[in-house]
Amino acid sequence: MSEINFSAQDVADFLQSHPEFFYEHAELFAGLRVPHPHENRAISLGERQILTLRTRTKDLEWKLAGLMHNASNNEKISATLGAWCRRMLAEPDATALPAHLIRGLSDLFDLPTIALRLWDLAGLGAGEFTRDITESIKNYARELADPYCGPPAGQEAAAWLAVPPASLAIVALRPVDTRDTLGLLVLGSNEPDRFTADMATDFLQIINGLASASLLRLKAPTHAESPPPNDVPT
């Protein structure tokens, strides 16, 4: 009679295809011993399964803790954005919005240096927010579909920041449903991992939408409101 050799894979395939095997041979299942995953001793299959479930439970607990931490951070950021938006809405002087925008972002997001440059806004006079704007900057802004996050190397707009950053985010200010750019917002951080290429940019996009919408008030020149005409008796 020829000898039949079974490989470990053959045995595994058989047990997977015949789940009733251990039910029909319960005494074998109860008596099997397998190596402990972390200690130099053997344990029963039941103990081994319990250890596996405990490990999976710990992994799920870590994942749940991470999700809760992210949710808490997102909630704080949402509240911060809401406060920033309310401040801009309450600003009666449109020409004060650029400075207010920078000050609000710096205070609310604890960023050491922020720069803003704007163009094609007739209601904004020459000054800090219209300096050092080159054609290459405007072309870059037009082509920047999503915010840039990463190191400052090779970024012309990084020169606007008062303090050289370790990482930065660049947002092209573009009102919703239009390709026209109003300017560039540059957020600088002294932490190399504050703005990274793999980070999500959802909140930066929200900042873009809110900032652009508020700055549209400067699209047309500001004029003093004319007093109503006096009634002339007939």
Image: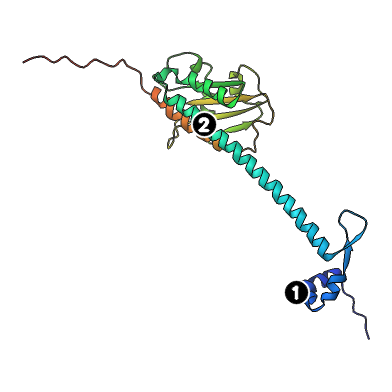
Left or right? Give the position of 218 relative to 187: left
**Badge 2: few (under 14), some or many (20 or more) residues near its Cα, within 10 Å?**
many
The disc at residue 17 is 1
Query: Marks 1/2: CA distance?
Result: 56 Å
Q: Is residue 70 left or right of residue 139?
A: right
Closer-to-camera residue (49/70):
49
Q: Quadrant of the C terminus?
A: top left
- Image point (47%, 33%), residue name: 209
Relative vertical location of residue 123 with respect to residue 171 in this rendering, above or below: above
Position of residue 144 measured from the top left corner of the image (x, y, whole percent): 54, 33
Label 1 secondary element: helix
Q: Nearer the viewer, mark 1 or mark 2?
A: 2
Residue 147 picture quarter: top right
Place residue 228 in its image quadrant.
top left
- Give the farthest residue toward the bottom: 1
Q: Give the residue drawn at x 73%, y 53%.
A: 57
The residue tagged 2 is 81
Coordinates of residue 107 in the picture (x, y in percent): 56, 22
Which residue is located at x 68 percent, y 47 percent?
63
Of residues 202 and 138, the one drawn nearer to the viewer in this rendering: 202
Closest to the observer, 21 or 13: 21
Q: Give, as a three-letter code, the residue at label 2.
A: Leu
